[in-house]
Every structure is written in C-alpha cells, then in structure tokens.
Amino acid sequence: MLLSVLCEGRRVSAGLALVFSVATILPASAQQTVEVVIQNYRFEPAEVRIRAGDTVRWINREKRTSHSVLFASEQGGESERFFPQESWERRFDAPGAYSYSCGPHPEMKGVVVVMAP
C-alpha cells in the first residue's frame, strides 16, 4: 500500500517505507516473562501456563530463607540458591510439562506448562 501526498507541487510516496518500518518493530508474537513468587515456603502460583519461548522468573520474597528451583533430572538441573529479594529465571523453548521443586525444601512443588506458540 502506497501513500501519495503532494508536497510543494511534487508527488511524494511514503507509505511503503512506513509499512516496512512498523513490520520490523512489532514482532509477530511477543515473548513474555511470567513471575512466580516464593513466599511462606510456597510457589505462587504453583502452576503457570506459558507459550514456547516465554520466560519464567522466580522471585524470593521470604524474609531469611534461600531457595532453588530443581527440575526433574531429564528436564534440566537445579538453579543456584537465591536469597530474599533475589530472583532466577529460565526460558522454555519446548512444549511440555516441567515439574519442579525447591532443592532445600522438597515439599515445595510447582509446574510450568509450556504450550506451542
């Protein structure tokens, strides 16, 4: 689509460049970051649903306790421990259900459900 305007007696076409500029700025599917709060020895929410390519950020809101995010061995390891007011994040590229717990507190459990984009 072309936009033609008359400028000082001359016709100028500017629309095509504008369309291409907007197309490069706006991604087809914006990736998001979802937050899980760790407080009172719980992951809140305990289940999050995201799209492939999104990131989950765990934020420790405890007063004194460190935590980690431990995935089942086939799903990829454990984060380092992070302390109150610190966070850790992971990007999920493949669809599936990723169960996790807290390394030092295995009774704390959660799941990240990753859907196709």
Image (cartoon, rainbow, N blue to C red):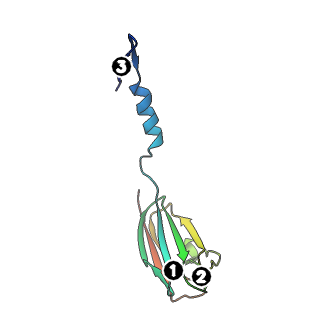
Q: Three-letter amino acid code at disc 3? A: Val
Q: CA distance from mark 2 to mark 1?
A: 8 Å
Residue 62: image quadrant is bottom right
Mark with earlier residue (2, 1): 1
Query: Where 18 falls versus 115 (above or below)?
Result: above
Name the residue beneath numbered marker 2: 67
**Taking 20 as reference, is 73 left or right?**
right
Name the residue beneath numbered marker 1: 38
Q: Do the numbered discs 3 and 1 sit on residues whose CB atoms are within 8 Å?
A: no
Residue at the far top in the pictured view: 9
Residue at the far front in the pictured view: 8
Query: Where 38 falls versus 51 (above or below)?
Result: below
Q: Residue at x 60, y 80 (%)?
A: 84
Few, some or many C-alpha atoms within 10 Å of disc 1 (few <14, some 14-19, many ≥20)?
A: many
Q: Residue at x 59, y 83 (%)?
A: 103
Residue at the far right in the pictured view: 80
Marking on residue 81:
none
Name the residue beneath numbered marker 3: 5
Which quadrant of the rendered structure holds the N terminus?
top left
At mark 1, the secondary structure is strand
Residue 11 picture location, percent across and down = 38, 14
Query: Where 5 falls versus 74 (above or below)?
Result: above
